[in-house]
């Protein structure tokens, strides 16, 4: 097993509240499909690039690669922050302070994040921190690859494609699934992502630690 494969295995969640083992197993199998497809597309694109064949096939595969590759990244961020026992972040956590600064508090932030998660369509609700502008914001991501704020760090990633909840809650169960999601957020992981982002950019960033 390579170190990448080992790291991937370690992000797989288990024993969640309201998200069953079968749901995770089916979702994980889909995620593995993204890993396989992204690697296969990368290989094809490298071959085309080597022979300088930048025609329509290259163009379409390049576009499609973004779908598969972002599918890999988002699923890993999603699974990694799902651990049983989560409720809300610690009062003293930096993420709590920033949620207060930008949304008025955890409850108000959660309301907006949930509303974004319930938006019609297939995609993701993501809490982002942009270290360049020192701004925290909730974002709707269409599909996997459209709408990401460039350079911002995804702190909390919620999959709201139907496959994320169909097994447990059925096609119309997105609301129940989102409630279950919030019972399983690992806020320590969110906090460590925030710290990495705060340390990642620009000396003039007032939030730099
Ligand atoms: Fe998914």
Image (cartoon, rainbow, N blue to C red):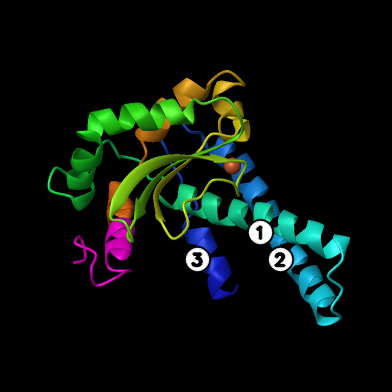
Report x, y in % for residue 190: 32, 51
Residue at 47% from the left image edge and 60% from the top image edge: 10
- Tell me if the residue at label 2 has its CB under 8 Å from ligand 1: no
Residue 35 numbered mark, or none: 1
Which quarter of the figure is the N terminus placed in? bottom right
| Circle nearer the N terminus (1, 3) | 3
Label 3 beta carbon less than 8 Å to ligand 1: no
Neighbours of disc 1 within 10 Å: few (<14), some (14-19), many (20+): some
1 and 3 marks in contact (CB < 8 Å): no
- Residue 39: which disc? 2
Counting from the top left corner in percent of width and height, residue 203 is at 24, 72
| Front residue of this view, candidates 77 and 84 | 77
Q: Secondary structure at mark 2?
A: helix
Name the residue rendered at 74%, 61% in the picture.
62
Provide the secondary structure element on which disc 1 rests.
Answer: helix
Q: Is residue 77 above or below residue 7?
A: above
Quarter holding residue 50? bottom right
Q: Earlier in the sequence, mark 3 or mark 2?
A: 3
Magenta span: 192-209
CA gap between label 1 and label 3 equals: 13 Å
Q: Are marks 3 and 2 in contact (CB under 8 Å)?
A: no
Rendered residue at 45%/30% (across/down): 116
Image side of residue 169 versus residue 180, left or right: right
Inspect the magenta stretch and tell me whether residue 204 lies in it: yes
Using a 10 Å C-alpha cutoff, classify the residue at mark 2 as few (fewer than 14 neighbours), some (14 to 19) or many (20 or more). Answer: some
Residue nearest the viewer, comparing 141 with 79: 141
> What's the residue at 60%, 49% (across, down)?
145
Q: Is residue 90 above or below residue 177?
A: below
């Amino acid at each position: 097993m390579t170190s990448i494969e080992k790291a991937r295995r370690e992000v797989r969640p288990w024993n969640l509240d309201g998200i069953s083992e079968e749901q995770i197993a089916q979702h994980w199998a889909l995620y593995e499909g993204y890993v396989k497809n992204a690697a296969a597309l990368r290989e094809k694109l490298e071959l085309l690039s080597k022979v300088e064949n930048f025609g329509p096939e290259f163009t379409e595969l390049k576009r499609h690669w973004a779908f598969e590759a972002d599918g890999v990244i988002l699923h890993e961020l999603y699974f990694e922050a799902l651990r049983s026992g989560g409720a809300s972040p610690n009062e003293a956590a930096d993420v709590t302070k920033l949620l207060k600064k930008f949304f008025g508090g955890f409850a108000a932030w959660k309301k907006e994040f949930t509303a974004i998660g319930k938006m019609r369509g297939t995609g993701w609700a993501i809490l982002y921190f942009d270290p360049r502008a020192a701004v925290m914001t909730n974002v709707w991501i269409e599909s996997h690859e459209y709408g990401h704020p460039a350079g911002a760090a995804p702190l909390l990633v919620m999959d709201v494609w139907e496959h994320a909840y169909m097994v447990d809650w059925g096609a119309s169960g997105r609301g129940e699934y989102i409630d279950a999601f919030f019972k399983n957020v690992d806020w320590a992981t969110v906090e460590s992502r925030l710290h990495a982002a705060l340390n990642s950019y620009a000396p003039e960033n007032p939030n730099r630690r």
